[in-house]
Image (cartoon, rainbow, N blue to C red):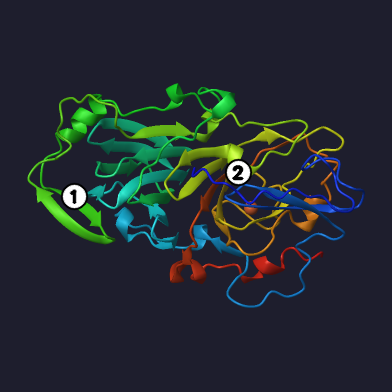
Amino acid sequence: MVKRNWIPVRGAQGAHSRQAHADMPDGTYEREVSKEGFFGPASFFHHRRPPTGWTSFEGPLRPRAFDLAALNEATASPWDAPRVLGNAHVEMRFWKLGAPMPALARNADGDQLLFVHEGRGDFFCDYGHLAFEAGDYLYIPRGTMWRLAPEGAAAILMIEATNGHYTLPDRGMLGPHAVFDPAMLDTPVMDEAFRAHQDEAGDHTVEIKKRGVVSTVTFPYNPLDAVGWHGDLAPARLNVRSIRPVASHRYHLPPSVHTTFLADRFVVCTFAPRPFETDPGALKVPFFHNNDDYDEVIFYHAGEFFSRDNIHPGMVTYHPAGFTHGPHPKALEHMLVQSKPATNEVAVMIDCRDPLEVSAAATGVEWGGYVDSWKRG
Ligand SMILES: [Fe+2]
């Protein structure tokens, strides 16, 4: 992160708490405004009403939700999967795959992250073989040749770090083995399945995506024919089960503590099952906020999504920067008293430092009523 000399103001007016997200004045709703995600200077307002109490919301800016599960038919190539959201630095596609890929894929535009929403099977690449299942992230460095062979149907959220790299976040004082131990990252192995895959006869085509356009290269053999490799660059697999989220019983932590992968202009965070806060004064739901520098995307994978009504697995919500968002009215009832001990939600958040474009495909599966879902029923 860029070191900045922020304008040095420090203030406090009226009724306010001293500790963020705790011990708010009675009957108030806290809203955070902040710079650079939740890492820069911030202020906390105490409002008399939930800051999402709008009665109308007109114009191109609004909270949006898309049902990706209803988006597309299965395609054999990941490059035929429709783009959902993107900009110059990130591209999200939702790919349904009904059978083993007939061709190999190679992304020349950037590192690729696959999040397996549904399905299981085999992942073959230059480096060897890995099994995959729902809840897996598969990190594929730019230029790797790869192929998926699902056992049945699979559904995958693809997140490309366009012209960039995926890295891991600095875990700071948590230490390098917190959240997930780097030892939990599995790399491909050159096993029997890989060798059998190498021996498949006939022509093999590689579909290379460069600047969004696909070129195909055909070989009279399987080009995944390495007999060995060594080095410190390889695809990696991480299942959401391996993520041990940071939680505090006394403080609602910002979503940035759930960062799993860091790219140059966006982050990928994982909301994994975790206990709710128990301290009497601590906020038990996400605080209202305008994350004014980031467009926020959340893909809902599994479980009950405690701060959102009417959202089911396979949906994605998009909160562009520019307005305040926060828990829905039903979740807000649990702002200070949470009846459940924990949330079982699993969701993937993609927070983007640059504004996103919504594709026509995504608009086609938009739930237009999302903007009204904060209205009290
Ligand atoms: Fe947010």
Q: Position of residue 145 (x, y in %)?
A: 23, 42
Q: Is residue 145 visible?
A: yes
For badge 2, the amino acid type reads Phe
Could you say which disc has been placed on residue 39 in the image? 2
10 Å neighbourhood of mark 1: few (<14), some, or many (≥20)?
A: many
Could you say which disc has been placed on residue 206 in the image? 1
Q: Is residue 332 above or below residue 121?
A: below
Q: Is residue 342 left or right of residue 303?
A: right
Tell me which residue sits at (68%, 31%) in the image: 247
10 Å neighbourhood of mark 2: few (<14), some, or many (≥20)?
A: few
Q: How many marks?
A: 2
Q: Position of residue 15 (x, y in %)?
A: 90, 51
Tell me which residue sits at (31%, 29%) in the image: 188
Q: Nearer the viewer, residue 5 or 319?
A: 5
Q: Position of residue 248 (x, y in %)?
A: 72, 31
Q: Is residue 112 above or below residue 250?
A: below
Outermost residue, bottom side: 59
Tell me which residue sits at (55%, 25%) in the image: 178
Tell me which residue sits at (32%, 49%) in the image: 110
Outermost residue, right side: 26
Q: Nearer the viewer, mark 1 or mark 2?
A: 2
Residue 127 image-quadrant placement: top left
